[in-house]
Amino acid sequence: MQIHTNFSLKNYNTFGIEAKAKQFVAVHSIDELKTVLENHATEKKFILGGGSNMLLTQDIDSLVIHIDLKGKKILKEDDDFVWVESQAGENWHEFVLWTIDQNFGGLENMSLIPGNVGTTPVQNIGAYGAEIKDTFVSCEAMEITTQKMKSFSKEECRFGYRESIFKHEVKDKYIITSVIFKLTNRNHKISVEYGDIKAELAKNNIEKPSLKDVSNAVITIRNSKLPNPKELGNSGSFFKNPILSREQFLKVQEQFPDVKHFDISETEVKVPAGWLIEHSGLKGYRKDDAGVHKNQALVLVNYGKATGQDILSLSKYVQKTVFDKYGIAIEAEVNVI
Ligand code: EPU
């Protein structure tokens, strides 16, 4: 286990931002993780997974610990379900493809989401009508100060829309080391209602889609809207979709009758931030190397040389423009460091 100093994080964040870590170490086992935490007990630490949900606006004056724990296995199965465990450092999309190859159902709608398995519970990742909480059973995590392992059940994680306990009560206290999912072994619940999946399948004359068909449709849709971080630095949705009280929503709708929205409950309405940004005239907007993506306004991109500060300024400009027009505050979804 080598500790690097003054280490470039450019290849460790999907925005492709140049920032340096004071110290950097990659850990490949629970024992290595324990040793690093014990040996550096008093130092400031920063835990890094796949780097797909953060914006680095400065160098990190800490020991960066990159979680590179690998491995996945079937824990048990019966006729209907299978319990699979993945270590935190597995790439999410590769894990999803592996489950589909085994004909295990439940994760196919979340194909191609960037990042590693260990960070998926933190913000309860989701796409095309599915969220991690639908198949999540539990995760193992190491307490940073004591190095004791603890298992978090689904209830304990308190999942919400892009929310969990790991963003609140136990923030920066635990490192997730593995996650267990319960997937279907047969009678898969194919879900194609959301968004463009149905249309994409119809285009290919697929009437009874397999898990692989759904995954392929999602991959095609995502590729058409969302930039590949390997080609154009980005962090997926930069903002969360704001949830308004019905009262506030009705006021907005009075002034802007065509505002897109989804009812969440009697009292709450979700408005797509992408719609608000696009209708504020900012889709495709670019300032130097920082931009609003041309196909999905919720995504901010780095055309090459943008700094974290450039992206941050752009995000503030977007927030202000949307607020000035609609009176709606949109919140960042990515972690601004
Ligand atoms: N819209 C626009 N203009 C845009 C973008 C969206 O008008 O530039 C409208 C669309 O027409 C649509 C609505 O907004 O009516 C929703 O758009 P979309 O289905 O593309 O989804 P989203 O709400 O913009 C969310 C997730 C994505 C996920 C998609 C698909 C959040 C913050 N984002 O985006 O997640 O892939 O749904 O399920 O909830 C991510 O988190 O990184 C991410 C990409």
Image: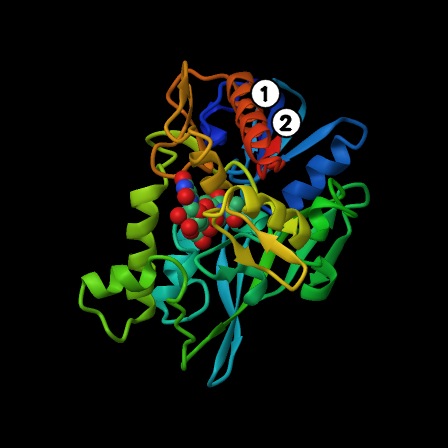
Which color mode does the image show? rainbow
Rendered image: mark on residue 233:
none
> Dot 2, crowdedness within 10 Å: few (<14), some or many (≥20)?
few
Question: Which residue is more in the foreground, 38 or 204?
Answer: 204
Q: Residue at x 45, y 47 (%)?
A: 258
Q: Dot 1, crowdedness within 10 Å: few (<14), some or many (≥20)? A: some
* Residue under numbered circle 2: 337
Q: As rendered, which of 195 and 164 lies closer to the eye? A: 195
Q: Is residue 157 above or below residue 182?
A: above
Is residue 61 in sight in this rendering?
A: yes
Residue that appears at 37% across and 67% down: 192
Q: Disc 2 marks which amino acid? A: Ile
Residue bearing the label numbered 1: 57
Q: Give the image quarter of residue 191.
A: bottom left
Foreground: 136 or 87? Answer: 136
Is disc 1 placed on a helix, strand or loop?
loop
Direction from residue 23 to residue 84 in the image, left or right: left
Q: Residue at x 34, y 68 (%)?
A: 211
Q: Is residue 198 above or below residue 244?
A: below
Q: Give the residue drawn at x 18%, y 63%.
A: 204
Q: Quadrant of residue 337?
A: top right
Distance CA(mark 2)–CA(mark 1): 6 Å
